[in-house]
Amino acid sequence: MPSKQLISNLAKDLTNSPGLKKKQKLTFNEKKLDNEILNQLKLVLTTKSTKEVVKTIFTYLASDELNKKQSIYKFPSSDYLEKIEYISKVNKEDGAVNIYIPKWMLIATSELIKDRYKKFEFTSIDEVIDILIQSYFDKIQYLWNPQL
């Protein structure tokens, strides 16, 4: 179908653009996350690293959302990116874990955050990561037990 091919090509061009290849530094405090769910996800993903769990969750959820929407243009990303960039500059915590996430992953997960915060009212990166941890955990729970 020509329209699907056009969307695919646009998405490919966009994800190959220099702006989206840039990475956004996310500084979060591991102690502020929902450690009960985080520890279960560490078991599932066979790692002891919170950083690796968060990277994996961003990758999985971003890919999943892009598959649903077919195009990166369908996400409410500009407010979200501005807020993330602002909070990342302001929140400098001791004992924080730094990860660098490609901007396309942030854009693709913006819908999940918007569902929780209608106007992106979160005040820390930890809140955003907690939502994504919960979303990923819910998907895994569903795969294990679809009746829930």
Image (cartoon, rainbow, N blue to C red):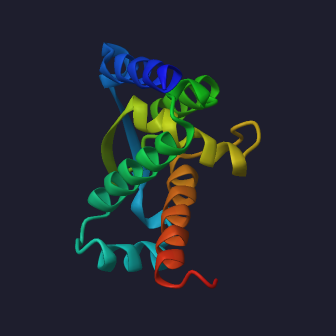
Which image quarter holds the C terminus?
A: bottom right
Residue drawn at 62 percent across, 42 percent down: 111
Instruction: Residue 42: tell me if it is visible.
Output: yes
**Residue sitting nearer the eye, 72 or 24:** 72
- Residue 7: percent from left, percent from top: 48, 22
- Residue 68 figure quarter: top right
26 or 135, which lies in front?
Answer: 135
Residue 107: x %, y % from top left:
50, 33
Q: Residue furthest right?
A: 118
Would you say residue 123 is visible in this rendering?
no
Residue at position x 48%, y 76% from top? Answer: 143
- Out of 25 and 92, give the one closest to the viewer: 25
| 15 versus 38 height, above or below | above
| Residue 34, x across and y down, in percent | 51, 70
Instruction: Please tell me which residue is depicted at 36% across the width and 48% down the height of the picture.
Output: 59
49 displayed left or right of 105: left
Residue 25 x/y as whole percent: 36, 35
Q: What residue occupies the far front of the structure in this picture?
A: 1
> Which image quadrant is residue 118 in?
top right
> Is residue 46 shown above or below 103?
below
Compared with residue 146, is residue 95 higher up or lower down, i.e. above or below?
above
